[in-house]
Amino acid sequence: MVSGNADCFDSFLLGTVSCTLFLAVNGLYSASDDVIELTPTNFNKEVIQSESLWLVEFYAPWCGHCQRLTPEWKKAATALKGVVKVGAVDADKHQSLGGQYGVRGFPTIKIFGANKNKAEDYQGGRTSEAIVDAALSALRSLVKDRLSGRSGGYSSGRQSRESGGGDKKDVVELTDDSFDKNVINSDDVWMVEFYAPWCGHCKNLEPEWAAAATEVKEQTKGKVKLAAVDATVNQMLASRYGIRGFPTIKIFQKGEDPVDYDGGRTRSDIIARALDLFSDNAPPPELLEIISEDVLKTTCDAHQLCIISVLPHILDTGASGRNSYLDVMLKMAEKYKKKMWGWLWTEAGAQSDLESSLGIGGFGYPAMAAVNARKMKFALLKGSFSEQGINEFLRELSVGRGSTAPVGGGAFPKIHAVEPWDGKDGEAASVNTSSNLQRVGFNVRQPFHKKTPTWRMIIHKGIKFSQLI
């Protein structure tokens, strides 16, 4: 099956682990194929403003599933030539375009029909026959809707040119009087277009700006706003910011001088820049201790990837040792905050079922796993638990490399409610009777100093402190 829940383990944009096989391939399609290569530059014109039905594959060149699909995709494109358009997007290279359509894995195939603003996921097989059948079925449905007058035909292409698929209400109209209150005194990031109603380029930008405003509002929860100023009416603002041509787009961030936006003018370009601004201004993620099931599930369900560290017992490291590990994690959380991952930690033995389900412990402590809760797959840190080692591990995840394994049992195990760490050194329980140690499985007939259990041994055997007293 090919869908938004694609096989190559989420590597796109949100930075998760992908296929275990990495192949250095520059691209899967060429100009000689009947597959039309799509990019952020031509996507809007070719697809969104088109009167045609489109099948679009979002792929990554290194993805093994994508490579196996390629010959079938080419056959389907040739068979459908002149009937249905078949395209492909290198979403590893053009991440902004994949992000715009919620691509989380590869390959993902979407059908752009009458309503280009609501692409449908293709859920069929991966043979050329199955792809062609799905395309013709979508085409038949479209024709029937046209005949019945329900869909308005391919007027969605025309609507896209007029409205861009966005809501003009999501573009904040600013004036000389409202600008400072809304923008200058705001903690949010603003992208402001200065336009003139008679300007042809401004008219071309309008639907893209509106579509981007709607998407950015949703993805940033309103933390990045798109606005517009009619510079022919609000001449004080135009003069204040030295507007000499139209459209001019400026970026406003609190406490900083405005800067010109010099990126592309398609919705995908605008959205990509807005999301970068959002990430740059976002606080580092919280680093939470797993003290309950709610903490684990809430964090992992809300993020495409959650990074879980299992730190040595407090009696093995003391507070200073633990804090040094937490500092490393915080630095990595800050470094990779654009990925919007979740960050969690627990103490060795506190969540032993979770450790087992993630295969943690074989490399000793501290240990780290990157978990995709949606697919219930994980990857383990094999290198050192250091800034360099973790950075290398996370960088590999970001580019889709690394081996993965399913979470044991296919779901998170029971999480025990524990008291949060108080930030202090731990207090060792008194261990002074051989009978109690024998009761929990330690042979004390040899000299005692050779058999004194470490706290890691105690944890491994599941010994309760009360049993040692």
Image (cartoon, rainbow, N blue to C red):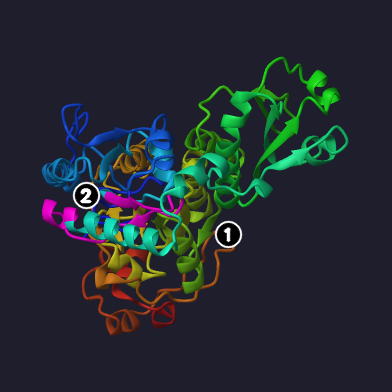
Of residues 3 and 7, which is closer to you in this image? 3
When asked about the image quadrant of residue 257, the answer is top right
Residue 384 percent coordinates (x, y): 32, 42
Mark 2 secondary-structure assignment = loop
Query: Which residue is drawn at the image coordinates 35% and 74% (left, top)?
Result: 413
Q: Is residue 114 visible?
A: yes
Q: Quadrant of the C terminus?
A: bottom left
Q: Is residue 292 visible?
A: no
Alpha carbon separation for disc pair 2 and 1: 37 Å
Dot 2 or dot 1: first in sequence order is 2
Most distant residue in the right direction: 177
Amino acid type, residue under disc 1 in the picture: Lys
State the extent of the magenta-drawn residues as a range: 108-132
Q: In the shown orientation, is residue 423 left or right of residue 106?
A: right
Residue 323 percent coordinates (x, y): 52, 49
User: Is residue 118 one of those drawn in magenta?
Assistant: yes
Q: Which mark is residue 279?
A: none
Query: Which residue is drawn at the image coordinates 46% and 50% (left, top)?
Result: 117
Q: Label 1 near label 2: C-beta < 8 Å?
A: no
Residue 415 percent coordinates (x, y): 42, 74
Amino acid type, residue under disc 2 in the picture: Ser
When asked about the image quadrant of residue 375, the answer is bottom left
Q: Which mark is residue 424?
A: 1
Q: Is residue 435 above or below residue 197?
A: below
Of residues 371 and 439, which is closer to you in this image? 371
Mark 1 secondary-structure assignment = loop
